[in-house]
Image: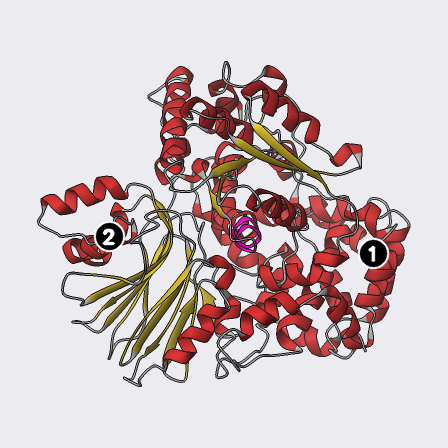
Amino acid sequence: MCGIAGIFGIRGEPVKQFEVEAMCDALALRGPDDEGYYVNGSIGMGMRRLSIIDLATGQQPVHSEDGSIQVVLNGEIYNFQELRAEMEARGHRFYTASDTEVIVHLYEEYGADCVHELRGMFAFALWDDRRKKLLLARDRLGIKPLFFGEFDGKLVFASELKALLQLPWVKRELNWSSVAHLFSFSTTPRRESIIDGIHKLQPGHILTIEPGKPPGVLCYWDVFFDSDTAHDEAWFVEGLRERLEESVRLRMICDVPFGAFLSGGVDSSAVVATMTRLSDRPVKTFTIGFPEKDYNEIAHAREVAKAFGTEHHELILEPDVIGILGDLAWHLDEPFGDSSAIPTYMVSQLAAQHVKVVLTGDGGDELFAGYDKYSVEQRERRYRHIPSLFRSLLGTVGGLMAEGMKGRNFLRHIALNGSYRYLDAGTLFDQNSRDALFQESAAERMLAEDPWQDLAACLAREDGHWLSAIQYLDFKSYLPLDILTKVDRMSMAHSLEARVPLLDHKLVEFAAAIPPGLKLRNGRTKHIFKEALKGILPETIIDRPKQGFAVPLGRWFRGELTGFVHDLLLSPTSRARNIFNPAYIEKLLLLQSRGRPLDLQLWTLISFELWCRTFLDRPTAFTGRHSAKVRARAETPRQVLAAQG
């Protein structure tokens, strides 16, 4: 596991090593154990290493026998031993025992198609000196991040946005399309970052660039929900058990202590149960909880820990989170509307005191239809039978009702058609609310932006079952943009590697072929996965209601954090940006104080404001080798609050 960064002078301009070093300094927590650089003419690549496999000889960049191929990797290749044996049989010589080196020799054999051979989580950069060609690649599901952009004839890339912002010639200007997406769906969009000109390499994509040609981006993998109707439920149950065990076994390969996040839900419990069967010692498990009973899953986690004899560690999170908000803004890298980043940060901190690697249960809800929203959509599909003229009338009535009036949102919701009705349920601020939230000058910059359009296109992508269409959407958006982003950033903040066995691409491809009726059956979510876990997990865990990794923000905002939220969002610093309408924010705070559930809307506003203070208000050009690390540690909420002016 590492952080990677680099610069390619497209027109042949030489790269300065201190620029690459400055980028890598910003990634220090991703790789506190080692660093390495390759700078040669118009190419410069660097990495910060978190030593997990091959502690002795796994330094990067890794090169071919003649030095013409250079690779830096962020991630893990789980089938590297098998691939190494194959490459050695073809005559390739290895000088390390690391997983990174297999990429070098696979490229020599297959070129850019080498990505098809890799099984794991990865983002890597490969330089082919003979062809003067740069290849960037990202894993199929988007577990590991990769940002890139072209500025002044240079292509720059890095594992995190903040690394690119260390370069003084990368402009810090908002991408207003991303701002519109953020305040609609809690995250920035699939292809763009919050900074104008900096893009995300999408999951399952490669980017190639060489002199005289524009950058080319190619999709090499996608998930297809094509139902396999030739097999019965028992066949799928057995197949899931086999693939789950194989996936967990592969992710237990490492040369350092490892454990697991354990919420007490089906997914993380399944991973822990499988680890226990495969391990000759107690598995270390880590859980976070809250004093508020209806948000606390610790009792369920304890039940699982006891059932499988784990070495269990837990932490109760109190509403004194102001002390970590500045750190969150720095580590999240972009504004982020999912407040469960808070407990993810804290459980990562807890785990990092004991291990360097954790396995997680992420991806199970998207893969096996575990979210309540799937059941809600199943019920709401009856609205499509309401005549369009009558639905339009209901929408008009809802639009005439005052904001906050009972029934207004329901009427507006059922008036929408198809994909837009589904997307509406997960929207933070609809178009009318966004118009009220933003000042006129900011709203005008987003007039041409329709955040729903891209997601609606994802829903239209599937020609089959409605459930498959929604799952496909979540695999393209919610999973990589929210869930995996959160886990990656919060674990890396503590130099902790998080592995995701339920998102092994072979397991994903198998599960995608399971008919929708075996995933969501008579209102029972994850039916097929729960059947596969019978006899493995306690029945009380398999059939308990889904709770989710929620945070009691609403109570905190009406209690201990009331003053903080008000002072931050209505501060002189915030007002001076001329982005938000203070009167509307005051209205939101009033409605929240009266019990309206607006905690996620307020959290997104908080996250955006703290991000602006961290990355826009005090832009840093590199002034020394370790300036970024110093700044990361010095960025405290006390400083953030002092910046209110």
Question: Residue 627, percent across and down?
Answer: 55, 75
Q: Which residue is mark 2?
A: 96
Q: Residue 623: which disc?
A: none
The reply to whether residue 429 is in sight is: no
**99 relative position to 244: left or right:** left
Q: Taking 9 as reference, is 200 left or right?
A: right
Q: Amino acid at mark 2?
A: Thr
In the depicted view, which residue is nearer to us: 435 or 85? 85
Category of crowding for the residue at label 1, using alpha-carbon neighbours closer than 10 angstroms: few (below 14), some (14–19), many (at least 20): few
Name the side, left or right, on which 225 lies relative to 645. left
Residue 311 visible, this orientation: yes
Is 516 drawn above or below residue 578 in the view shown?
Answer: above
Q: Mark 1, mark 2: which one is toward the viewer?
A: 2
Q: Position of residue 614 (x, y in %)?
A: 65, 71
Q: How is the image coloured?
A: secondary structure
Q: For residue 521, which quarter of the picture?
A: top right
**What residue sits 37% from the left and 18% below the top?**
235
Question: Which residue corresponds to the image point at 65% horizontal and 22% vertical from the top-left?
Answer: 544
- Which amino acid lies under the numbered mark 1 shown in the image of this protein? Leu
- Viewer-closest of 313 and 237: 313
Queried whether the magenta region covers residue 368, the answer comes back as no
Q: How many marks?
A: 2
- Asked which secondary structure carries label 2, the reply is loop
Extent of the magenta region: 487-493
Q: CA distance from mark 1 to mark 2?
A: 68 Å
- Where residue 356 appears, x then y in whole percent? 48, 45
Question: Label for residue 400?
Answer: 1
In this view, which residue lies farthest toward the front? 56
